[in-house]
Amino acid sequence: MAIYDYLPKFNYIEPNNLKGLQPGFVVAQEDRVAEGLLKNGMFENGKICALTKDGIVAATGEERALFIHYTEPLNTIRNSDQYFAVEVANECPRLVQLIPGDEWMSTEDLGDNILGGRIVKVTGKGWLAVNTMANGDKGYHYVFLG
């Protein structure tokens, strides 16, 4: 048993294509995160959010712009994604604006028809049937439709 076995585990994502990273559609300075998005003060990757005058809130689907929380862990010695979440008291999370066609894998099952069909879980055969993360964890494939 390794020391890592005693650490809390969090959901994480593998971005297949988050186009918002390319032109810089990123929000990285907002430190106000709604309590409903936190797990013991930690903000997991893959949460679908919106920005309001009150800060980062859970998305309802009514917003024009949706964001996904994706802050990369700094530990590159070991695959640490499942042990990483942003502690909002000490660090600002990074949100990437979703653009139609964005794809990602997540360890969190968001359901089949998310936010009124704006995000869909991809299932099928071949590439569409991929359901494991790079390290072998169970994963779910999502696409943002707009």
Image (spheres, rainbow, N blue to C red):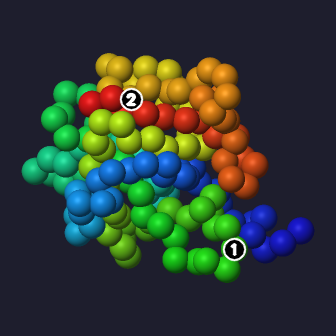
Q: Is residue 60 visible?
A: no
Residue at point 18% right, 34% down?
63
Can you tell which quarter of the image residue 26 is in? bottom left
Residue at point 54% right, 52% down?
14
Q: Position of residue 8 (x, y in %)?
A: 65, 60
Q: Tell me, yes or no, whether the two marked residues, 2 and 1, touch with CB atoms within 8 Å.
A: no
**Helix, strand or loop at disc 2?**
strand
Is residue 17 or residue 86 the one in the foreground?
Answer: 17
Task: Give the mark nearer the N terminus: 2 vs 1.
Answer: 1
Quote the CA–CA distance across marks 2 and 1: 31 Å
Residue at point 75% right, 69% down?
4
Q: Going by the picture, which residue comes out furthest to the left?
A: 53
Q: Is residue 37 above or below residue 144?
A: below
Q: Is residue 29 visible?
A: yes
Mark 2 neighbour density, 10 Å: few (under 14) some (14–19) many (20 or more): many
Q: Is residue 89 above or below residue 12?
A: below
Can you tell which quarter of the image residue 83 is in? bottom right
Q: Using residue 142 as the reference point, say whether residue 48 is left or right of it.
A: left
Q: Position of residue 125 (x, y in %)?
A: 66, 22
Q: Position of residue 49 (x, y in %)?
A: 30, 44
Residue type pointed to by label 2: Ile
Say the numbered circle drawn on residue 119. Answer: 2
Residue at point 48% right, 51% down?
15
Mark 1 neighbour density, 10 Å: few (under 14) some (14–19) many (20 or more): few
Q: Quadrant of the C terminus?
A: top left
Pointer 1: what residue? Answer: 78
Q: Is residue 90 above or below residue 111?
A: below
**Helix, strand or loop at disc 1?**
loop
Q: Using residue 95 as the reference point, say whether residue 84 is left or right of it.
A: right
Residue type pointed to by label 1: Arg
Can you tell which quarter of the image residue 6 is in? bottom right
Q: Quadrant of the N terminus?
A: bottom right
